[in-house]
Image (cartoon, helix red, strand yellow):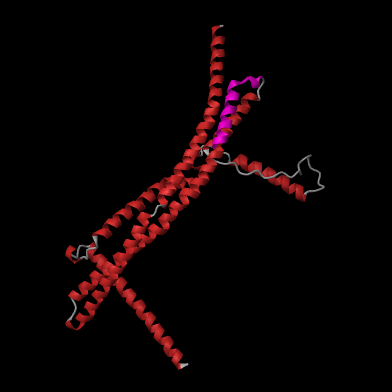
Amino acid sequence: MEGWKTLQTGIAGLNLGQSANKFAKGFTSSVQATKERLGQVSQEEITELPQEYKDLEARVDALRNAHLAMLKITKVYETEAYDYPVQVQESLSELSTNLGAGFQNFAATNLKGTPLSPGATSPRPVLEAPHKTLPHALTRASHSASQMLVSTPAGDSSKLGKALALYAQANETISNARIEHDSVVQQGYLHPWQTTLSTSINVAMKARQAVRTSRLELDAAKQSLKNASPARQEQARLEVENAEDDLVQKTEVAITLMKTVLENPEPLKNLNELVKAQLSLYSAAAEALSGVQGEIEELSVAAEGEYRKSRDH
């Protein structure tokens, strides 16, 4: 039992010693950083890092900033309604539709045998919320506008009504392509692009921070050696040597990690997926619109001819 207590005490003392040493190093590096920031340390007293390391730092910074610049814009693809007209108010009508369907389903289950209007208790599936994209909004608007025109007396002869129906048809195709586009962009570009930023680039940035901390600890140790009393000279010299070894090791690790990040082909592959998705969407849009544009132009020419003819009389 005494042996066990002695071991526990020894481990506690070791952990305490490690914590104290870590705290002391953190304090000295913080003091060193403050002195440098305030200009209390000459440039000659700051350890120079290898030029290769500094060049890699600049390249990794550029890569990180490039990722952030793209994400600032392309993160909109995470939200379906990024191009939806802000002035469109559909929430109330959508809510009333779903509430009506919800009441019918409730009545069919709970109000059997209760006198209600015919069909009131017929189960009706709750409609899915409509997609909120600009092509979907154009589809709904042009379809609705077409119905307004063709449902009037002699509406079947409305050329504008027919043209709007064709436009709705084209936009329905574009709407489907748009949903597919967003899915491909999210999976093939956006998610892996964000992963690269949050993993490999972030790991390299943390390795660089470790180098900076190690360099500060080394320069603080050099200052301690410079001001050490004769009795502490040997210990201070040993601390400088250990700090130098630590800096060399951490610099090598950071160089390796930064090179790995810069050589990673994934960002190019991800960007290619974005371009392919956009090409597919715009190709589908061009095909759908070109498919109806000729018919709409014929209706336009016919309407203009009829108008001129009526004016001549």
Q: Is residue 308 above or below residue 136?
A: above
Q: Residue furthest top?
A: 313
| Quarter of image, res 255 | bottom left
Residue 280 lies in the magenta stretch? no
| Quarter occupied by residue 128 | top right
How many discs mark residues in the rendered view?
A: 0
Q: Nearer the viewer, residue 106 or 303?
A: 303
Q: As drawn, is 62 to the left or to the right of 288? A: left
Relative placement, left or right, of 108 versus 280 is right
The question of residue 159 being in magenta is answered with yes
Q: Is residue 30 visible?
A: no
Residue at left offset 52%, top offset 46%: 183
Q: Whole-percent x and y of residue 305?
A: 54, 13
The answer to whether residue 70 is above or below residue 158 is below
Instruction: Examine the rendering and report whether any part of residue 186 can be seen.
Output: yes
Residue 96 pos. (x, y %): 65, 42
Please tell me whether residue 6 is drawn above or below residue 111 in the rendered image: below
Q: Residue at x 25, y 68 (%)?
A: 32
Q: Which residues are magenta?
A: 154-174
Q: Main secondary structure of the magenta part?
A: helix
- Coordinates of residue 77 in the picture (x, y in percent): 48, 45
What residue is at 39 percent from the left and 86 percent from the top? 10
**Image quadrant assignment for residue 238:** bottom left
Instruction: Decide: is 213 above or below 156.
Output: below
Q: Residue furthest bottom?
A: 2
